[in-house]
Image (cartoon, helix red, strand yellow):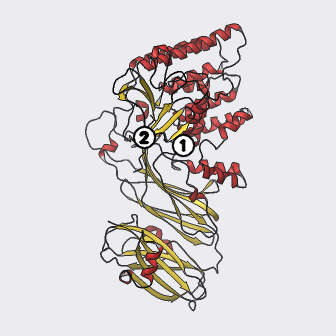
């Protein structure tokens, strides 16, 4: 399972005092983090132009200032009642952004404590006061932004949606931006996308450039890749599509989350925050890259002293959503698929899908057979099993989070009777040039086999995604890999992917292969492997080809394989087969299956390799990884 530690952000020391260990909260200071961010100033923060609306009269200006004082007082009082924990200092920064020190704190089991009732009451009072003031200055976008942000923070999403729907700000794009933010938090991703696109179409050019700038969220290698593409805007659209955690889920919540972070940052300009520092470019960048904390805690310094620090905390389940460069940076000669690995550790940006608690790696296999009108893509895997603990409603979770977790037909609080596992959603997808060339969906039983296939259009390169998702348990698994879908000339000698079949399977032809694909790449040490492949470009039975297949350890280097090839250093011949035959009777693919025994291999990772050599052609090879348990 993919795990990710909580991200911590803390404030570095400000000139004139220590931000982390300041005066009591009612005198004014504050700090943050669960992504832990520590903030210390290295000079004054870079500030954008003031966000508050220019008031049309002295009365409206006074009302606006009254709203700002109320918001500032709430944030000061919030600090007084934050949950307390022992702590002190912070580890080395993984990254410093302006006044902020950021590190992954290593706690992958952190969960937020219940918010103190006093803070809930103070926020309710603030919202009531802002509602009253807003009736006197209805066009003040700063006041409107505070109302939206604090309603969402309080979990009052329906009230926030109603307010956003009634928005009457002169700059209508702000209304749509805040509506998109609320819809995203409601998990109405399509609604959020529509609202954000309206906002982007209408917002000023300078703000549009900021909100669509890839620099905050892309590493140096992906920024270079985008800049090298003929159409950089289309390349960025493709990256956003691939950043979508699950094609099974409606909409692209990674893109709507990015827009939501910008909306949150917009509402935070000129507003006080628990970091006890003016809003600046560094806070904006941290918000856009990592989001805003889901909870706050106040830590007291260990070893004596009366100072404290405030940490803003994020859920540890966040992950890197953008693809690694190797999945995109294909070459004309590349044949083997490139697996997209979900990597742990500190990343430039992270995302936690609102509908998931965990996203794990799917163990399965993907294969391609070439056809006259496209590439047949096949995927096979075992759907994950659901344990009883996965199905039980969690009474500690906010009711808004439970709506998709309760199994159909089982009421919350029902007796301890048996819980039937709901079906899982499963899908096979092929992304090509920023669009889904293949979109196959089904429902499957938990713990059962999944075999899907579809014809993908010709394309230089694409990304295949195998996915399963249980909305009820908020768990998903996926396997993504980049690979080619290029058209192959009929007379070009080529080899398909090598596919693992169920032991002893004897498909009559390639049309039956998808139904007998092995759903697990784990095998017993003495279990024979059954495999299938196709050869293209052999023109007749008189054109002979030499076939050899063997098994080798995955971690063997080139020199080790060369030594084995020369006949030294091992008994490779005991797990090797070979034969010779000609091409098919009629022009077309030569389909073959074969079995190869495993002579009590030790547990570990291996590959079965096939090599095809025809007269006048360079040898062709294909591999399939498997694990001996």
Residue 456 is left or right of residue 599, and the answer is right
Which numbered dot is residue 371? Answer: none
Residue 98 at x, y = what percent?
A: 58, 34
Locate the C terminus and report the quarter of the image it occupies: bottom left
Query: On the image, numbered disc 2 is attached to which residue?
Result: 316
| Residue 422 appearing in the image | yes
| 152 or 12: nearer the viewer | 12
Residue 475 is left or right of residue 328, and the answer is left
| 524 or 220: nearer the viewer | 220
Sort mark 1 into few (<14), some (14-19) or many (20+) by Cα contacts within 10 Å: many
Residue 306 at x, y = what percent?
A: 38, 20
Give the answer, above or below, for where 490 lies relative to 27.
below
- The image quarter containing residue 451 is bottom left
Of label 1 and label 2, which has the lower sequence position? Answer: 2
Residue 430 at x, y = what percent?
A: 57, 58
Q: Dot 1 lies on which element?
A: loop
Q: Furthest-top residue in view?
A: 59
Number of dots carrying numbers: 2
| Residue 508 appearing in the image | no
* Residue drawn at x 51%, y 42% as measured from the top left: 351
Q: Furthest-bottom residue in view?
A: 542
Give the answer, above or below, for where 88 lies relative to 625.
above
Alpha-carbon distance for marks 1 and 2?
13 Å
Residue 511 is left or right of residue 357, and the answer is right
Which numbered dot is residue 349? Answer: 1
Residue 32 at x, y = what percent?
A: 48, 28
Sort mark 2 into few (<14), some (14-19) or many (20+) by Cα contacts within 10 Å: many
* Residue drawn at x 42%, y 81% as measured from the top left: 564
Give the answer, above or below, for where 366 lies relative to 17.
below
* Residue drawn at x 48%, y 84% as measured from the top left: 547
Residue 28 is left or right of residue 138, and the answer is left
Q: Dot 2 lies on which element?
A: loop
């Amino acid at each position: 399972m993919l795990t990710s530690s909580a991200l911590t952000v803390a404030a570095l020391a400000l000139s004139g005092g220590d931000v982390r260990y300041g005066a009591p909260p009612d005198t004014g200071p504050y700090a943050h983090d669960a992504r832990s961010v520590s903030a210390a100033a290295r000079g004054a923060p870079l500030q954008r132009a003031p966000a508050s609306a220019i008031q049309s009269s002295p009365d409206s200006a006074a009302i606006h200032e009254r709203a700002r004082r109320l918001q500032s007082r709430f944030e000061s009082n919030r600090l007084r009642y934050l949950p307390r924990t022992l702590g002190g200092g912070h580890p080395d920064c993984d990254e410093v952004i302006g006044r902020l020190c950021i590190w992954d704190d290593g706690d992958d089991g952190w969960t937020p404590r219940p918010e103190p009732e006093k803070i809930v009451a103070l926020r309710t009072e603030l919202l009531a006061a802002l509602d009253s003031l807003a009736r006197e200055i209805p066009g003040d976008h700063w006041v409107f932004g505070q109302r939206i942000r604090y309603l969402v923070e309080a979990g009052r999403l329906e009230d926030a949606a109603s307010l956003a729907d009634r928005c009457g700000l002169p700059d209508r794009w702000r209304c749509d931006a805040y509506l998109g933010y609320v819809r995203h938090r409601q998990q109405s991703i399509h609604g959020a996308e529509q609202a954000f696109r309206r906002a982007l179409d209408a917002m000023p050019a300078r703000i549009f450039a900021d909100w669509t700038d890839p620099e905050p969220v892309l590493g140096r290698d992906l920024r270079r890749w985008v800049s090298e593409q003929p159409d950089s805007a289309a390349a960025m659209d493709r990256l956003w599509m691939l950043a979508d955690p699950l094609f099974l889920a409606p909409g692209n919540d990674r893109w709507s989350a990015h827009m939501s972070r910008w909306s949150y940052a917009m509402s935070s300009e000129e507003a006080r925050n628990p970091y006890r520092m003016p809003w600046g470019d560094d806070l904006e960048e941290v918000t856009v890259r990592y989001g805003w904390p889901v909870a706050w805690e106040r830590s007291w310094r260990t070893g004596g002293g009366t100072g404290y620090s405030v940490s803003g905390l994020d859920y540890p389940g966040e992950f890197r959503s953008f693809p690694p460069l190797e999945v995109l940076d294909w070459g004309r000669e590349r044949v083997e698929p490139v697996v997209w690995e979900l990597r742990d550790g500190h990343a430039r940006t992270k995302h936690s899908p609102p509908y998931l608690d965990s996203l794990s790696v799917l163990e399965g296999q993907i294969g391609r057979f070439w056809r006259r009108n496209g590439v047949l893509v096949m995927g096979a895997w075992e759907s994950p099993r659901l344990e009883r603990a996965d199905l039980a409603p969690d009474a500690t979770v906010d009711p808004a989070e439970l709506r998709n977790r309760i199994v159909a037909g089982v009421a919350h609080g029902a007796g301890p009777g048996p819980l039937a596992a709901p079906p899982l959603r499963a899908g096979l997808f092929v992304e090509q040039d920023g669009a889904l060339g293949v979109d196959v969906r089904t429902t499957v039983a938990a713990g059962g086999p999944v075999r899907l296939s579809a014809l993908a259009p010709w394309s230089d390169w694409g990304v295949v995604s195998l996915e399963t998702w249980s909305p009820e348990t908020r768990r998903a698994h996926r396997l993504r890999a980049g690979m080619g879908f290029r058209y192959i000339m009929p007379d070009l000698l080529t080899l398909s992917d090598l596919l693992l079949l169920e032991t002893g399977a004897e498909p009559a032809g390639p049309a039956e292969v998808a139904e007998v694909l092995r759903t697990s790449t784990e095998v017993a040490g003495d279990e024979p492997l059954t495999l299938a492949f196709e050869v293209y470009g052999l023109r007749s039975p008189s054109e002979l080809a030499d076939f050899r297949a063997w098994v080798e350890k995955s971690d063997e280097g080139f020199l080790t394989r060369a030594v084995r090839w020369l006949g030294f250093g091992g008994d490779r011949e005991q797990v090797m087969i070979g034969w010779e035959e000609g091409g098919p009777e009629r022009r077309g693919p030569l389909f073959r299956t074969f079995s190869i025994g495993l002579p009590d291999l030790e547990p570990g990772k291996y590959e079965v390799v096939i090599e095809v050599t025809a007269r006048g052609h360079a040898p062709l090879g294909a591999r399939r990884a498997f694990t001996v348990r």
